Image (tube, rainbow, N blue to C red):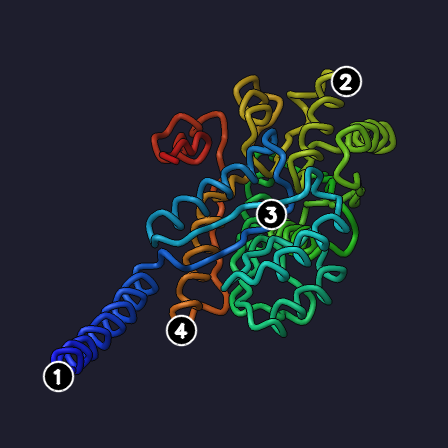
């Protein structure tokens, strides 16, 4: 009987030590990030969309660096807002510690974003803002500054009297609004500059193509066009090439897809504003990790854009932007 009691009393400190060790190991795992769960929901998870696949690469790189688990998702089409809402609802049900969201619509995603916060899940918004700003941190390109750079680039190309048309996605889009505001501010510095108007292509290349043809028919004085996204740029370039106006109409776009790079090389696209989607994904996950750790993430982080032309596209730094190959 005495021996039995002795064994029991010897086991008590061992069990306590084991429990303490388990708690310590759990703490180490949490601090190292291995148990940090993050779901990244992009506007599109289509493998053909180079921008979002580069965002994915940035998110995965940050997750690896900070030893967190990042599950990257998104609808096939950027315009499928309702599918993206469903993906956020599903993510909430899975109870990750943080969600990184690139909202496809600044109003329709607000209610489900508020559900994220109510569920006690940290929310980082990237690329486009949400109405009411329900996020813990917001990371995006500095679109106002990018617009100014686009306007200045076109003004330098159209010597004399710039007559400019703007081709956008949709009216009211915060990203497009900031870019257009920057363009108009930059062009306003030249008293001779004329902005013929803004047309909307609803993120459809064919509509951008038709709108460009109509603009050039109605306003033969146009000598410059600025397109606020990739699809508008590709549609406008197709129309300009077809009309043999690549020399007389200077085209400035946004984006760095392989198709836009080819247009730069051939001289149809005269400049493009290249964002840094890798940074977008990387900083989004980094902010999520900081929030999970109880740190105060930057409430707003602006990423600058770079003007790339045929003349500077082969510079080493610009090559890194145009071809952001990274280890995965």
Q: Position of residue 22 (x, y in %)?
A: 28, 67
Q: Nearer the viewer, mark 2 or mark 1?
A: 1
Please give the residue where the numbered disc 3 appears in the rendered image.
42
**Considering only order in the chain, which callout, 1 or 4, is on the residue closer to the N terminus?**
1
Which residue corresponds to mark 1?
Answer: 2
Nearer mark to the viewer, of 3 and 1: 1
Q: Earlier in the sequence, mark 3 or mark 1?
A: 1
Against 49, is 141 above or below?
A: below
Residue nearest the viewer, comparing 38 with 12: 12
Residue plotted at (56% across, 56% down): 126
| C-alpha gap between disc 4 and disc 1 | 50 Å
Q: Are the residues at dot 4 and dot 1 in contact (C-beta closer than 8 Å)?
A: no
Would you identify the image quadrant in which residue 311 lies?
Answer: top left
Sequence-earlier tag: 4 or 3: 3
Q: Pointer 2: what residue?
A: 243
Q: Is residue 185 visible?
A: no
Any part of residue 7 in sight: yes
Residue behind mark 4: 294
Q: Nearer the viewer, mark 2 or mark 3?
A: 3
Lower sequence index among marks 2 and 1: 1
């Amino acid at each position: 009987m005495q021996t039995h009691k002795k064994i029991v009393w010897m086991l008590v400190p061992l069990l306590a030590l084991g429990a303490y060790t388990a708690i310590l190991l759990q703490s180490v795992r949490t601090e190292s990030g291995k148990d940090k769960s993050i779901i990244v929901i992009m506007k599109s998870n289509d493998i053909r969309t180079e921008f979002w696949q580069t965002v994915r690469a940035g998110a995965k790189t940050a997750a690896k660096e900070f030893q967190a688990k990042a599950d990257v998702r998104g609808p096939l089409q950027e315009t499928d807002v309702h599918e993206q809402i469903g993906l956020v609802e599903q993510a909430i049900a899975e109870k990750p510690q943080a969600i990184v969201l690139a909202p496809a619509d600044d109003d329709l995603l607000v209610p489900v974003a508020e559900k994220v916060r109510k569920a006690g899940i940290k929310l980082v918004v990237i690329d486009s803002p949400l109405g009411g700003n329900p996020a813990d941190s917001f990371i995006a390109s500095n679109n106002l500054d990018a617009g100014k750079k686009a306007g200045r680039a076109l003004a330098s190309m159209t010597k004399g009297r710039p007559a400019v048309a703007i081709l956008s996605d949709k009216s009211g889009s915060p990203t497009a609004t900031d870019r257009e505001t920057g363009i108009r501010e930059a062009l306003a510095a030249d008293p001779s500059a004329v902005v013929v108007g803004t047309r909307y292509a609803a993120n459809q290349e064919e509509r951008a193509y038709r709108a460009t043809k109509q603009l050039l028919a109605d306003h033969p004085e146009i000598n410059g066009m600025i397109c606020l996204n990739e699809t508008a740029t590709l549609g406008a370039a197709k129309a300009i090439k077809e009309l043999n106006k690549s020399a007389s109409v200077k085209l400035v776009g946004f984006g760095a897809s392989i198709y836009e790079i080819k247009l730069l090389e051939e001289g149809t696209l005269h400049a493009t504003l290249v964002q840094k989607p890798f940074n977008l994904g990387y900083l989004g996950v980094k902010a999520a990790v900081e929030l999970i750790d109880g740190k105060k993430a930057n409430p707003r982080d602006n990423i600058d854009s770079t003007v790339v032309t045929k003349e500077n596209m082969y510079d080493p730094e610009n090559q890194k932007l145009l071809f952001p190959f990274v280890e995965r």
